[in-house]
Amino acid sequence: MTLLKKVMERVLQFTPEKEPDPLIGEGKYIGKAMKRVDGVLKVTGQAQFTAEYKFDNIAYAALAYSTIAKGKITTLDTADAESSGGVITVITYKNAPKIGKPALMDPSGGSSGAMAADIPVLQDERIYWNGQPIAVVVAETQDQADEAVSLIKVEYEEEKAVVSFESELPNAKTPKDVLGEDPEVKVGNAEEAYEKSAHKVDHVYRTPRYNHNAIEPHATIAHWESDEKLVVFDASQMLYAFKNTFAKMFLIKPENVEVLSPFVGGGFGGKGSMWQHSILCVAAARAAKRPVKLNLSREGVYRIVGGRTPSVQHVALGANQDGQLEALIHHGTTQTTEYNNFAEQFSFPARYLYNSKTFDIGQKVVHTDTLANTFMRAPGESIGTFALESAMDELAHEMNIDPIKLREINEPKSDPLRHIPFSCRNIVQAYKVGAESFGWDPKKPGSQSDGKWRVGQGVATAYYPYYRFPGKAKAKIFSNGTASIQAAAHEMGMGTATVQLQHFADRMTLPIEQVSMQYGNTSLPESPMAGGSNQTASLGASIEAAVTALVEVCIKAANKSASSPFKGLHAKDVDIKSGGIYGKETDVGCSFVEILKLAGVDELEAEGASGQPFEMLKHSMHSYGAQFCEVRVHSETGELRIARWLACFDAGRIINPKTAESQFRGGIIMGIGMALMEETIYDDRYGRVANPSLAEYHMPVHLDIPHIEIKYLNIPDEHAPLGARGIGEIGITGAAAAIANAVFNATGRRIRELPITLDKLL
């Protein structure tokens, strides 16, 4: 079953819906560059993140981690830790509260569960990976908890573990699916077509492991108000899934669990699954009978929060004399475990970007005894575009053709594999606008220099699919002329509240100063996870539904008065304008304030539900971009610098240029890090991360990044709510390939294994 079908079938509680209403007129706020509504709170330190919430009588927890990859604990001596100053309790598998079977995350956007792996949480002596939590110490202070952890003595009976990705490649297997899609796709005989092609390239590309390093490390605060009532503050990307997971694993009713996450200091997928510390914090609070805070250290994040899988990808492209692809072959292998079985979808770009007479696309996985891998910004697409877009550049060089021209030649008129129309695709225009603005003029590889610096330009296509999930929202109006929208959405720095207030204000035709938004709490209507670049479109559809429902409520309430101007009218017969409701034919109506007076109440509210995303069945929907960069490589030292960057995106309507450009830039910066420095060093003897700190895991800093110029076409997609498609992840896609292609143009050296470091350049 495809992911799309799973999305369509799973949400029976939501009402059917009409096609999205992408265009609501020009509006006063949509499309305007506006400052984040939470900006002042954040820069003045008033915004409270999970670890900053205050509870009376709070205790502090710290974790002890395993040092073997597979086996079982034979001795676990906690006596010294228990007698250490300030220690309240030490929890191990011997005395842990009963914790139920993990409720696994549903990648189709459902909220049934959130756990990253199907492994018992501190319920037995088994060890499944190097770094697994084996004990929780609860103490009066954080220092006391950390000190006590160091006093725990443990011995193991070690078993032979499979921890090396490279050594397991011969044993790779085909997974049952790749994010709900078929793992193998074949059209025609690609091998035969490749052999007969006039021009061809055939290479292997490699990407390493990457670890999550959000500015806010993971944190949880748990408080049992009673044996059956749980309140949890958690750094989360999917509130309702966390709520339901806590309920299932601690055997209480979901309505007795409240999860709060109003501000999240970056997620990028790492907070899109639930990791064991969240469950252990709740267990510790139950054992200690008081609120407990568990903050992961930066090293702790490396030990128990999964990252991006390594990959080996084989791409072979064959083209005729005119550059038309005769064969597109993209195969590869990633890593996962038996307990999460997540195959990162690197093959998705090859399925949608280019026309080819034949296709042969396939993914395999190896299973290792390691920490479960998980989503990381544009999972699959980021590493997949590195391989595919590098290969396209190599084919262009082999043919002595401009790489942009090669992409234009192979631009499909409809979805290459599903054979349905694109909802809105303007990638050729994005390349044209980007090339003109950037000054695209690639010379012969290795021919440009500035003193001892070799100079080169590179391009690559950015690509990320469109996702939208069902959700709910509640709209309210008040007698003082204000209105609010409520949804259990997430604000992780991308400007969610800001853009939805722009949207809500325009829908209600109210000044933006008169509208507010409440979010980040499971006491509010259910929203889908903040992942897959879906939140703007998903919330947009939910808010539209809520406002429509509110109009019906307003008409019904006003009609209780004999002087109501809405007699005989329904929502379809009226428009919202000038801060009120007015008949389409008669233009008779009144303001929201007057409606409340007619109804004799101080406020009215209505909840609306966005239903199935039908647009995803009828159209092939994606966001695109053209990445341009210029690099300089020192001829003697091999030092690599990014000198210039410009990207032009085709992502539908841009709701807020200021927050959108921030998202685009953030993704590109992560792509630069991915290409040049980020790499998890993994000890293949013991299955342990060897560089678990920001001192050793290198990421870009300000001096590594040039000014990044952002352009966008701003062409609304009439099949998407607000005309907008996702932008949170597309910036990282294609970025690594653009750099590798520019390095080749500067030096003549083709780097097919990330990161592009000095040893590979010299």
Image (spheres, helix red, strand yellow):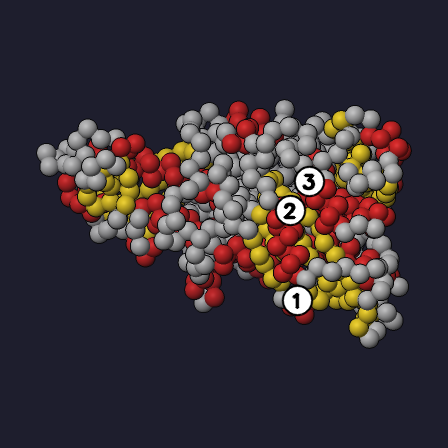
Cβ atoms at labels 2 and 3 below 8 Å apart: yes
Residue sitting farthest toward the bottom: 451
Which x, y percent locates residue 675?
Answer: 74, 56
Give amino acid for label 1: Pro
Q: Give the residue number, with chain letter if any, for mark 2.
A: 428
Q: Provide residue 370's location: percent of width, then percent of height.
A: 75, 42
Q: Look at the image and tell me whether residue 694 can be seen.
A: no
Q: Label 2 to label 1, Cα distance in Å?
A: 26 Å
375 shown above or below 170: below
Q: Return the residue nearer the eye: 431 or 281.
A: 431
Q: Amino acid at mark 2?
A: Val
Residue identifier under label 3 = 411
Q: Residue at x 77, y 59 (%)?
A: 442
Mark 2 Cα within 10 Å, few/some/many (few <14, many 20+)? some
Residue positioned 38% across, 45% down in the render: 25
Measured in 3D between alpha carbons, the distance from the residue under mark 2 to the one under mark 3, in whole angstroms, is 8 Å
Residue 649: mark: none
